[in-house]
Amino acid sequence: MSKQHAERYIRVQKQNTRSVDEQVQISHTMWESGIGPDADGIKKDDLEDELQLDLDFNIETSVRHLTEIDALEGNAPSGPDFYAISESRDEIVLGRIDEVAVDDIGSIIEHVQDNDPPREGDEVAVTDGGEPTLRGILADEFDIIPTAVEQYLRVGDHVEKLNAAVEAIEDSDTVAARDDYGRIIFRRGAYRYRLTEEQANRYKQEQEV
């Protein structure tokens, strides 16, 4: 089967790009694999492996070039526009974001208290000099006094405070993070790419000749 018309279109439109050979390879392989305008498409990060492409240039670069000339189109996935992923649970927690954040903050507070030095009477002991405690690390992060850490973490934007606290702990050289808490990460649903109707028609025209 000839693919000359579809290939010529890419080479003319993108003749000044170094990745033009790989752009052609991507288009041809997607056509051969049936990833046309009626298909659901394939995620950009999966293109190289699933289609067994041998590429030297960044796949994102070639996909962008092909999209610019309407040879490929991005197809928004069905479902929500974004996903909330809990690092501590390693699962999507959309619909339970605040609940999970509150639970993880509770785990951080437990870690803070476990890491405290021995109490002096009813007061939380704060070490002078030496390695900072987790309480001291979070007090510095949020610009509060050490004894206010628990109350500060429990109020306000739980996700924002959870993520900031985890970052501060992970950046610390003196306290290791525990696995019963983690950030909540927001990610957009990945677009899926497929050949446009116009590019598919270029292949079909040559089939009909």
Image (tube, rainbow, N blue to C red):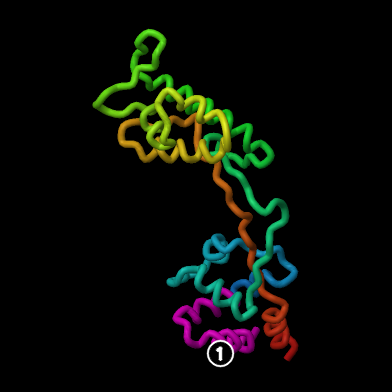
Instruction: Please say if 83 is above or below 157.
Output: below
Drawn side of residue 145 relative to residue 1, left or right: left
Residue 150 position, x and y percent, is 49, 25
In this figure, which residue is indicated by the disc labeled 1?
A: 12
Residue 177 seen in the current view:
no
Is 152 on the left-hand or right-hand side of 119?
Answer: right
Q: Was residue 162 drawn as part of the magenta stretch in this picture?
A: no
In this view, the residue in front, 2 or 67, is 67
Name the residue at 66% across, 36% down: 96
Q: Quadrant of the N terminus?
A: bottom right
Q: Amino acid at mark 1?
A: Val
Q: Left of 149 or right of it: where is 130?
A: left
Above or below residue 193? Residue 189 is: above
Check the picture and name the quadrant holding the C terminus: bottom right
Q: Would you say residue 17 sits in the magenta stretch?
A: yes
Q: Residues within 10 Å of mark 1 (few under 14, many from 20)?
A: few
Residue 134: image location, x then y, percent = 38, 28
Judge by depth and name the residue closer to the eye, 135 or 104: 135
Instruction: Please provide percent x and percent y for residue 152.
Output: 50, 29
Range drawn in magenta:
1-27
